[in-house]
Amino acid sequence: MSGCGCGSEQTEHLERKTLAILLAINASMFVAELILGWIAQSTGLIADSLDMLADAAVYGLSLYAVGKGGLKQAKAARISGYLQILLGAGVLFEVLRRLLFGSEPESTLIVIVGGIALLANIICLALISKHKKGGVHMQASWIFSTNDVIANLGVILSGILVSLIGNRYPDLIIGTLISIIVVRGGLKILKDANETRKSAGGA
């Protein structure tokens, strides 16, 4: 019996340690990508930076939920889902603003920053993959990390296309696609959280 308790405590400790590392990586990348994305006039990078911010919030909420019951884990996941949807809508607004008022994306900077963000997210994905079978809060973290890698590949592709084609539309398209991925991820998290809440006896 005591062995089970120790195993549970060890799992919780590992989850907390993993989430703390993910939180630090994503918070740092949010600041870096937002600043460099603004300098590069890239909606793709700005979208990805906001995705990093959403991830940091999710990891923080998941860190809070570690070791707590299913209802609290579901609540943390639901907040994460709503936040992701909100940020996705914000990115769509930024894409529309730049479409109307113009932008001149810097392709080289987009590719370099996108590559650094991709490396950071691959590290995050490798860390969280060990816990993807855990509670709904950890599953939400896994969804976020997977979406991030896809988004980073899109950002790099947009930088290459901006250079080859010579206009801003690939960047705007990738920014739009990332926002859709972010919103879809948020909806998936909400669905999983509601199912967990029902199974745990929540209203």
Image: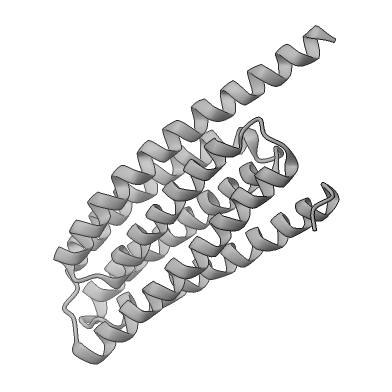
Residue 16 is situated, as x and y percent measured from the top left of the image, at: 54, 28
For this orientation, the residue located farthest to the top is 2
Tell me which residue sits at (62%, 57%) in the image: 78
Relative vertical location of residue 163 with respect to residue 17 in this rendering, above or below: below
x then y, percent, for residue 4: 79, 15
Residue 13 as seen in the image, left or right of residue 28: right
Give the residue displayed 58% in from the left and 29% down from the top: 15
| Residue at 28% from the left image edge and 67% from the top image edge | 159
Residue extending furthest toward the front: 203
> Is 23 left, or right, of 190 in this rendering?
left
Closest to the observer: 47 or 16? Answer: 16
Q: In this view of the protein, which residue sits in the foreground, 142 or 162?
A: 142
Residue 55 screen position, x and y as percent? 45, 51
Q: Can residue 174 be seen in this view?
A: no
> Residue at horizontal 66%, vertical 18%?
9
Left/right of residue 127 with respect to residue 108 in the rendered view: right
User: Can the viewer see residue 91 in this picture?
Assistant: yes
